[in-house]
Image (spheres, rainbow, N blue to C red):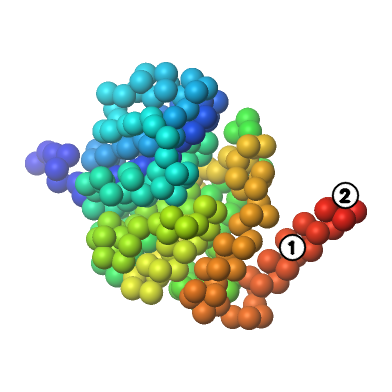
């Protein structure tokens, strides 16, 4: 018996994009070259002027939907994609990151084996602007919402997917957040479902001078504090210690220039 595309649960991947023409081709190729046969791919571009649109058009026969128009930022763009998504499982992939070739197939297999799992993710490569691996991110054990909330585990967004019915029921990304929207979403969904970490590299997160993780890192802190307060994070824990270290470093640089 030959399985048809419709025999595989549908998956939607949303790529928010704005002026990432230098990197977006690798992002697109990592999605359209997945071995998994039932992927809906949506690109929500915020009105790029750097050649991004030419690259999207180059591959548009493999893209389910794309648009290029002004939006209200990354969170808003992702939500627009999620609201039109037809997939049973959804995730987003930023336009400077990319997936490993086997990622979607492995993730969907994991979802199918355990109906209590609402979020599946894996290990992550950290790469430099040229794509060279400079580090990895993993979590030591498979834990729950309070471990993420209090810093025992960390959110690994790139390559993570969620059950779409959970987002439909409990809400999409919080558009008041520009930096910690993934953290908030995981905490919210984690009240109703389990997390599962696959024990191998799923995605690649590119660090470069214009990415938010590098260029705007300190701006994450107020939003992380907001999310922790919302979900009852401990006052003294690894997360608060890490936040203190970042804040101390920020003020040292402002005062002493180091």
The residue lying toward the viewer, choosing from 223 and 236, is 223
What's the CA distance linking mark 1 and mark 2? 14 Å
Q: Where is residue 50 in the image (x, y as percent from the top left)?
A: 52, 22
Tell me if residue 26 can be seen: no
For label 1, count other residues whose C-alpha is less than 10 Å away and answer few (under 14), some (14-19) or many (20+). some
The residue lying toward the viewer, choosing from 152 and 68, is 68
Q: Where is residue 206 in the image (x, y as percent from the top left)?
A: 58, 40
Tell me if residue 164 can be seen: yes
Which dot marks residue 42? none
Q: Where is residue 138 in the image (x, y as percent from the top left)?
A: 56, 58
Q: Position of residue 90 (x, y in %)?
A: 32, 51
Q: Which residue lies furthest to the left in this view?
A: 1
**Dot 1 lies on which element?**
helix
Which dot marks residue 247? 1
Q: Is residue 36 above or below residue 19?
A: below
Could you tell me which residue is drawn at 60 percent across and 33 percent down? 131
Badge 1 or badge 2: first in the primary sequence: 1
**Dot 2 lies on which element?**
loop
- Relative horizontal placement of residue 128, taking residue 142 as reference (left or right): right
The residue that mark 2 highlights is 257
Could you tell me which residue is drawn at 33 percent across and 73 percent down? 192
For label 2, count other residues whose C-alpha is less than 10 Å away and answer few (under 14), some (14-19) or many (20+). few
Q: In this view, does 44 lie above or below 151?
A: above
């Amino acid at each position: 018996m030959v399985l048809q595309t419709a025999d595989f649960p549908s998956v939607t991947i949303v790529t928010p994009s704005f002026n990432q023409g230098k990197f977006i081709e690798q992002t697109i190729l990592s999605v359209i070259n997945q071995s998994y046969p039932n992927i809906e791919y949506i690109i929500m571009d915020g009105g790029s002027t750097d050649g991004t649109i030419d690259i999207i058009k180059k591959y548009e026969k493999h893209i389910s939907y794309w648009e290029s128009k002004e939006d209200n930022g990354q969170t808003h763009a992702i939500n627009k994609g999620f609201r039109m998504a037809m997939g049973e499982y959804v995730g987003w992939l930023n336009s400077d990151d990319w997936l490993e070739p086997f990622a979607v197939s492995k993730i969907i297999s994991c979802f199918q084996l355990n109906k209590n799992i609402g979020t599946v993710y894996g290990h992550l490569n950290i790469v430099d602007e040229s794509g060279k691996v400079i580090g990895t991110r993993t979590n030591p054990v498979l834990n729950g919402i309070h471990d993420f909330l209090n810093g025992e585990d960390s959110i690994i967004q790139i390559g993570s997917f969620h059950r779409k019915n959970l987002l439909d029921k409990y809400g999409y990304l919080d558009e008041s957040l520009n930096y910690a929207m993934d953290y908030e979403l995981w905490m919210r969904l984690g009240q109703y479902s389990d997390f599962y970490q696959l024990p191998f590299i799923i995605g690649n997160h590119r660090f470069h001078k214009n990415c938010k993780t590098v260029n705007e890192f300190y701006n994450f802190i107020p939003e992380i504090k907001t999310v922790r307060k919302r979900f009852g994070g401990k006052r003294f824990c690894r997360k608060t210690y890490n936040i203190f270290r970042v804040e101390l470093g920020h003020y040292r640089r402002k005062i002493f220039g180091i």
